[in-house]
Amino acid sequence: RALYGGICIRAPWWPPSFAMLRSATRLLPRAAAGVAVAAAWSASRSHDQALCQLEVKGIETCVNGLPTTNPQGRALYGDGFLHLIKGATKKQYEAGEYFFRKGDRAQLFFVILSGEASVIDEDTSTVVDVLGPGCIFGESALLNNRDDRVRTLSARTGCEVLTVPKEALYKELRLARPELPTFPSREELVLAFIQMVVPSEAKYTRRVQFGEYIFRQGNRGDPALYIVNAGDFEVLHQEPHLAEVKVSSLGRGECFGYVSLLSENPFNPKRFTVRCTSRLGKGEILSINGADFHRLLDHSQVVSSLMSELKRTRDELNYSAMAKFGANKIHNWRGC
């Protein structure tokens, strides 16, 4: 699903919590603890994938035909997304019928209630992926500010889907993040989408003071995505035997924490330090649980590609900052 913007309903099951895993591994040698945590992370994600379709079948709570909670009663979606689904239109597609073709105008996104959809590469006329019940598709073009489709999708079998117009999506995104500008960027739209889709219990808002650290380089903690709601923050990095340097600044509507989320083992020490620099008033950040966010990351092409781009940019800024620091140090050492 990750290649084509389909988001499969994911059972929000996460065996032992991050804190429990961290506590349990304190008794192990450091190397063994790292292996244990990485194995637990990998196994839990694999188990989550295996339970996906099984738990969907057992869900009783629905909105407009779409399951909204797992058997344990935990929400799968945020209130904003469920509000969209309540107003969605049901539509039937026969096998072989196109949802849209590459180059068509992007006006809707879709949620599959039953049946399967094929993702088609029109250059080779081959099916490159199959989406099943609970998958969302078509949102990628809308969040990328595109007017046309970049993929072709057709009904592999008879399908019942929910269709949501882009105007309704944009309206709900603005309710999720009222501070969105008149002409939002792709990053702003995707972050608003994340905030809208992730369940309420997976998010919390935190106020911070000037000089307060969100986390420090080398710290270990529960992985999370952070979105700046207010205030200013700075990202710092320090190489061994060198002074700490500022890599970048963050303001309202930007995010951080994705470097850990994209690593093979999100429990590895933090690579950067993030500190509040708001002298007037308080800073405010929205924290999104790493487990819930990772399910969305795994199954949304537009989310995963944005996070990968942000990580690449952060690394480039880090290399540039360290190179500049090294050049200045040599310059000063020469007494020039």
Image: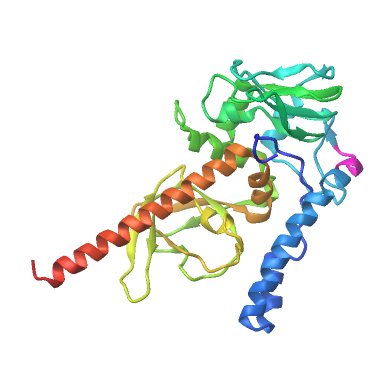
Residue at 71% across, 71% down? 20
What colouring does the structure picture have?
A: rainbow
Q: Assign the N terminus to one quadrant of the image.
A: top right
Q: Find residue 284 and report its horizontal and vertical position in percent.
A: 48, 51
Question: In which image quadrant can residue 78 be found?
Answer: top right
Q: Is residue 249 left or right of residue 305?
A: left
State yes or no: residue 57 in magenta: yes
Residue at the left extreme, as displayed:
336
Q: Is residue 280 above or below residue 105?
A: below
Residue at 25% across, 65% down? 326
Q: In this view, does 164 lie to the left or right of 306?
A: right
Q: Find residue 324 and report its horizontal and vertical position in percent.
A: 25, 59
Residue at 63% across, 46% down? 297
- Residue 115 makes an appearance in the image: yes
Q: Is residue 51 above or below residue 151?
A: below
State yes or no: residue 244 in magenta: no
Residues drawn in magenta = 56-61
